[in-house]
Amino acid sequence: MNESSSIIKQGKVQFPFQNGYHGSGIGWKNESPSLIKLFHFWVNFAMWGILVDLGNCAARFFKTKKYYIQIHGYIMLLVCTTTFIVEMIVLVKNPKIFIRYSTLSQIQILHFLLGFIFMILFILQVIGGYVLYLIFSREQFKMNKYSYYYKLFHQIFGYMLYFAGKAGVLTGFILIEDQYVIITSKGIIKLYNNMILVLYDNKIYDIAKVNHPGGNFLMMQIKGREIGRFMYGAFGLETTNIISLKKDFLNIFMRMLTNFIQEDL
């Protein structure tokens, strides 16, 4: 297959059309994201893109409610625990990331460092939040300067983690979006300029590499057409006086096309 066919893929199917392609056009560049990457992306998006805001709202705007501390604590514990589990799964499933660290792009390095440092910091924040909860839940608790500063530190550190989490989600979006390719009509015309696409057996093939005894003239006559009628010898080309294919020539041409397809796939 020509080089243009390796530019974009849709799952395991290349786009532009690989021989035998049967489907739609828009796809992924190089390789589609693995299930682990998609799981990592969507879970972290749900946790740090949505749920963390609910936890912050509980602590910021519902202080007059009786159980606002518990609601805030349980939400943030769920966010941090889920994030930790997901990060561990990614590291276990992709241990070579430390070996090929130097080959990563700048945005990949930033996302990786954010996630790694972030994971350590939010563990400390959860522990600190639990200690703060124990302090506030004491019956004889009275606010003093030490507990005030501890609470203030927890709050500031929490906002730092909040914005770091949003940055992680943003860089994750960029990494996912970079794998998509927008295919314009001009791009398609450029890619297909040297291709001879035909329809055979309900599948699309590029037969530009097939050397037909009739020369390039015949190849251009069937470009963009369904060629089953010609392959089986039922019809000749309407625009020529060439008779339909005889059986022996059909067998030769079928072998040529079959070998070409098998080599290409």
Image (cartoon, rainbow, N blue to C red):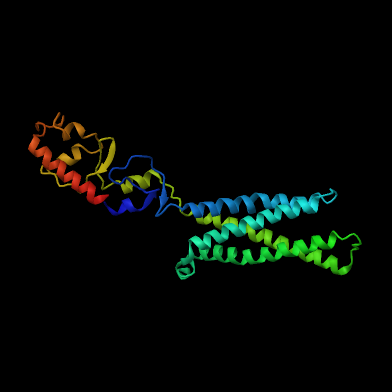
Q: Is residue 155 visible?
A: no
Q: Is residue 202 visible?
A: yes
Residue shown at the point (85%, 65%) measured from the top left = 148
Q: Position of residue 129 (x, y in %)?
A: 75, 61
Horizontally, is 25 left or right of 2 in the view? right
Query: Camera-side residue: 139 or 100?
Result: 139
Residue shown at the point (59%, 55%) measured from the top left = 169
Q: Position of residue 7 (x, y in %)?
A: 36, 53
Q: Position of residue 188 (x, y in %)?
A: 35, 45
- Whether 263 is drawn above or below 249: the answer is below
Query: Camera-side residue: 69 or 114?
Result: 69
Horizontally, is 55 left or right of 136 in the view? left
Horizontally, is 119 left or right of 231 in the view? right
Residue shown at the point (48%, 65%) measured from the top left = 95
Q: Position of residue 172 (x, y in %)?
A: 55, 56
Residue shown at the point (57%, 57%) measured from the top left = 86
